[in-house]
Amino acid sequence: MQQIPGPAVPSGRAVLRPIGVRDAVITGGPLARWQEINHEASIPLGLEQMERSGALPNLRRAGARAGEGDGPFQGYRFQDSDLYKQLEAVSWEHARAPEPGYAAFVEQASAVLARAQRSDGYLNSHYQVVKPDKIYAELEYSHEMYCAGHLFQAAVAAARAGVGDSLLPIARRLADHLVEVFLTGGNDGIDGHAEVETALVELYRLTGERAYLDLAAKLIDNRGKGLIADSGMGMLYAQDHLPVREADTAVGHAVRQLYLDAGVVDVYLETGDESLLECSVRRWEDMVATKTYITGGHGSRHDGEAFGERYELPSDRAYSESCAAIASIHWNWRLLLATGQGRYADLIERTLYNAFAASTSAGGTRFFYVNPLQRRDDLVEDAYLGRRREWFACACCPPNIMRLVASLGGYLATETSSGLQLHQYAAGHIEAAGARVRVETGYPWDGVVRVTVEEAPEGDWELALRIPSWSESTYVDDGPARAGEDGYFRIRRAAWHAGDTVELRLDLTPRLMRPHHRIDAVRGSVALQRGPLVYCFEQADQPEGVEVDDLAIAPDAVPRPVAREIEGVGRTVLLEIDAARTLSQPRGGLPYTDTPLTTSTRATATAVPYFQWDNRDGGAMRVWIPLA
Ligand SMILES: [Zn+2]
């Protein structure tokens, strides 16, 4: 079967080579379930929304000739990007599990785009319909290049997946137009919302057109030099406060920072400019140490959808946008390919199973934009903090989720000349590095991963298994397995035979996780974690009369795993733990007292994996629980 390269395919400098999107077939566990509901529920919903939300009608309007109707422009100025992400999702899904409607959708959308595209290659329905006199005149908030980037990624996916051949020429005409204006035409502007950089590099990888890479590099070099206006949100908002190589910490709009850094690593991978990799790793280390939620989420301020200060990580006001989780996975994936360091796969896993997975309902038809770590039961109606919704006026997240889930297979493993590296564990088959292996596991509910060689590689070959940093005592076959400095345990043999097996046993002992003492918002609290899964306490699981917000946990309490199948939630492993209720005695009507808090009424509290929350009632939830 012909290989279909996935979303990011570096040309040579990468330490690890990605496998194709079809080379890993996931057959069991949550990842398989997400792909199934993506196929059956999310993508059909997304396709329907392309008409209803205005994405396709806007573009038809942009391409309308005189007398062909002129309905109003619908939605935001970046509405086109919803369609592009949807096209990308459909393209990867076509590679994974084709449906006859997918190719037809890509062809129909391409025809609308071809008609809307100006003869000089420009394409953006908002500016063509609403503000034709402002094209490239308000780059600080126009999202013109941001939308273009999503078109490039969709076109790359469609070309690789072989679903229609009309999208790529449209994307190239627009990319050529950007090159004429911003690379060779004397315009030194950048887009206020980074994204086009990583996309241009991928378009270069597909087409070999060097100007696309040069433009990506120039856009990165030009950021932080005051070449575009302040959008009114401040220069940090768009990471335009400092040149990229000088910025030490992730700031501003989280999704912009994370896409920008994905592009920074992409340009390094093609040009070898070490200063780009260095600054990106520096920001990564600072962000992971001081600005990352235990769920892997990023963005702690609703104001500006932004990173906060170091250790500013509130639970209830967490922003943790679903798109930020996706952008973080993109960035970490490129860092993993560039360096071979398992710490990036570790963060992908944490983000994937928690911040990202929580974004979608068990049925696949409702989504979170914001992923808080606490919801109070008296929550006043709020556009973002309430319950998952079917769609949003600003619908950046749902189609973004769909494109990642459709391409998930590509993130499980990589190959090198020495063998195969397994980064994420899921039941299924992987065909790469000259071998075919079967993976049997109940991960993440169970920590045993059995890898069987079905078709043996030739001669000397190595199987590398990521040992997650949370696994305290790990075994491979009968012996304790210590990961190397890069986070991988390697099994190298001079000869492999069909039927050879390797059994990895990860330590899923549930743990009480404590926050860094400077994270004031959750100081004195603990969170439960079992394997890669972070847990939360939902009101629906607590005994009668015990409110989630009154729970306290003894420091020496030991969580007990309980396997369950819950209606509306699905297969799960709950954690039960001894808890108590905290009692406060406010004074003078104020919620403060000089009397020490007391606890009473011992109870058994029950926690559910965070990614499965909000699938029952709309009650209280919290990840962090104070210690008694
Ligand atoms: Zn979003």
Image (tube, helix red, strand yellow):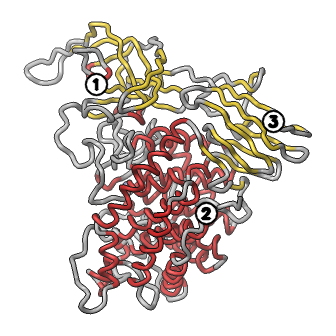
**Image quadrant occupied by the C terminus:** top left
Q: Quadrant of ligand 1?
A: bottom left
Q: Which mark is residue 60?
A: none
Mark 3, secondary structure of its residue? strand
Q: Residues within 10 Å of mark 3 (few under 14, many from 20)?
A: few
Amino acid marked by disc 2 = Asp
Q: Where residue 323 sits: x, y (%)?
A: 42, 53
**Distance CA(mark 3)–CA(mark 2):** 30 Å
Amino acid marked by disc 1 = Gln
Mark 1, secondary structure of its residue? helix
Vertical relation: 450 (above or below) 335: above
The one nearer the camera, 219 or 91, is 91
Q: Where residue 400 sits: x, y (%)?
A: 43, 56
| Residue sitting farthest toward the top | 601
Front position among marks 3 and 2: 3
The one nearer the camera, 266 or 108, is 108
Label 2 near label 3: C-beta < 8 Å? Answer: no
**Distance CA(mark 2)–CA(mark 1):** 44 Å
Q: Which residue is mark 3?
A: 491
- Of mark 3 and mark 1, the one earlier in the sequence is 3
Vertical relation: 398 (above or below) 269: above
Q: Which residue is mark 1?
A: 539
Q: Residues within 10 Å of mark 1 (few under 14, many from 20)?
A: many
**Distance CA(mark 3)–CA(mark 1):** 46 Å
Q: Which image quadrant for residue 163?
A: bottom right
Can residue 123 be seen in the rendering of this structure? yes
Q: Which mark is residue 266?
A: 2
